[in-house]
Image (spheres, helix red, strand yellow):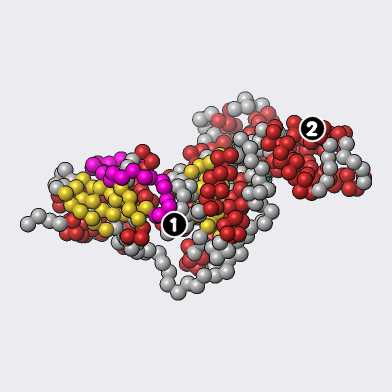
Amino acid sequence: MKPDHHKVWSKCLDFVKQSIEPMAFATWFDPIVPLQLRSDVLTIQVPSLYFYEIIEEQYIELVSKGLRSILGPTAKLEYSVVMDKGRSAVSKHDAITVNFPTSNKVDLRNRAVSTNHASETVIKNPFVIPGIAKLNVDPQLNPDYTFDNYVEGDCNRLARSASIAVAKNPGKTAFNPLFLYGGSGLGKTHLAQAIGVEVKNVSPEKTVLYVSANKFQTQYTDSIRSNSVNDFLNFYQMIDVLIVDDIQEFAGKTGTQNTFFHIFNHLHQSGKQLILTSDMAPADLQGMEDRLLSRFKWGLPAEILAPDYETRIDILKQKIHKDGISISADVIHYLASHINSNVRELEGALISLLFLSTIDKNEITLSTAQNVVDKLIRRSQREISVDYIQKTVCDYYGLEPDSLQLKTRKREIVQARQIAMYFSKNLTNSSLSAIGSRIGKKDHATVLHACKTISNLIETDRDFKSQIREIEAQLKS
Ligand code: ADP
Ligand code: MG
């Protein structure tokens, strides 16, 4: 008698089961339904594209071995992916067919997937935690960060419209996760929060949470200390719209990344919305686990660029209008043409101007504006960066400016590199991995080691200590 699809799949599962953890098996294989068997092609139904990716990425070798042992060397696997209603990531109607061996990285958008509607299939959710009542979660949102207050420009059009789409239909668009990235002060936090604010306005019953990556990390480490990791996980798994700000801060923090990976999987798979922000594109993030990076790339990475002149004028006008003050056109022009890379600084200049005008009770003149801008520019030039530290350390020891990048174990260079790492750790906000990647392409452990070595030397070697003091003085001068 010919085997039917149930039998084949159940035999294949017996095989898979032997090699993977029970928890992983329950998570990724229980929800799969075998649909049909035509000669040597087995069709299985997976609850989402996301499942398909996980199977392809992590389990395809096992599954392929299992199937071949049952159906012979020409066995093929075909996926039928259940699509949520309203979700439009893929709309073609052929099935994904996988010929073994298959590559682990498949760009879903270039492949065809058969779709049917979620309501037709009951998806068992292996993560549901019984007995957890919906808590009243404070979303941690700033009500001023709205779409209305967010000026649109060429620099942010894509990011802004994707965010609006997500806010209208959280979890139901192709933008999941929505990954907003760009330089500091360009409006990532504002835009990410605006999504939360809008969702809460329209659907107050939805659980929205904004959290900075740093806060998430602290909560996670606290939960380990107090033996309450499960509560931590349960809490995050309840969120409908989760916004994690400055995700680059997870760099090098493997434990936090793992935990976030699980939360991400759970939420994504349950059709919940994730919004992430970062100062770099997913492809450029350092110190991040590959499996997490691949998730980040899965939705839509949308870049926010520095605003052009017109947008800067619009932003200033909007803020001036909101504050109900009057500022002459030439002052606005002056600000917009001199502060050109950062909206936060543009705002800062405006606030200083307002402040000066209230103490002087004077009109804001062009020369007051010039003073404010001068001070601001000087201050931002003094901000200490990893590159500035490298340059100062090299200057101090009479080394070529880029010698710290050389692959060499020459003592003087190794030590200069360690000193630069030490200062970067203490004087900038960069993470260990970010520092390592800038200084000689080292990993975070090397940076950590450098910091310890230098601290020890400072304690034990007086000459060395005074050198460090001198460099520090130069850095801060
Ligand atoms: P980031 O998170 O990218 O560092 P923020 O979101 O904190 O930047 O933005 C810095 C400041 O600039 C905030 O006060 C924000 O309201 C303002 N801002 C940024 N972009 C815009 C914009 N397009 N329109 C209006 N305000 C903006
Ligand atoms: Mg921010």
Whole-angstrom CA distance, mark 2 to mark 1, is 47 Å
The amino acid type found where label 2 is placed reads Tyr
Displayed-image quarter of ligand 1: top right
Majority secondary structure of magenta residues: loop
- Indicate whether residue 36 is drawn in magenta: no
Few, some or many C-alpha atoms within 10 Å of disc 1 (few <14, some 14-19, many ≥20)?
some
The amino acid type found where label 1 is placed reads Gly
Q: Magenta stretch? A: 84-107
Task: Confirm whether residue 159 shows in the render.
Answer: yes
80 or 385: which is nearer to us?
A: 80
Mark 1 CB lies closer than 8 A to ligand 2: no
Question: Which residue lies at the image location 53% right of the left edge and 29% below the top edge?
Answer: 406
Please tell me which of labels 2 and 1 falls first in the chain.
Answer: 1
Q: Quadrant of the N terminus?
A: bottom left
Mark 2 CB lies closer than 8 A to ligand 1: no
Q: Is residue 104 left or right of residue 462?
A: left
Q: Is residue 281 above or below residue 118?
A: above
Q: Is residue 335 left or right of residue 216?
A: right
Residue carrying label 2 = 334
Q: Quadrant of the C terminus?
A: top right
Find residue 178 and name its label. Answer: none
Q: Is residue 456 left or right of residue 33?
A: right
224 or 357: which is nearer to us?
A: 357
Find residue 271 and name its label. Answer: 1
Give the mark count: 2
Q: Is residue 47 above or below residue 297?
A: below
Few, some or many C-alpha atoms within 10 Å of disc 2 (few <14, some 14-19, many ≥20)?
some
| Residue 76 position within the rendered picture, expressed as x and y whole percent measured from the top left | 21, 45
Callout 2–callout 1 Cβ contact below 8 Å: no
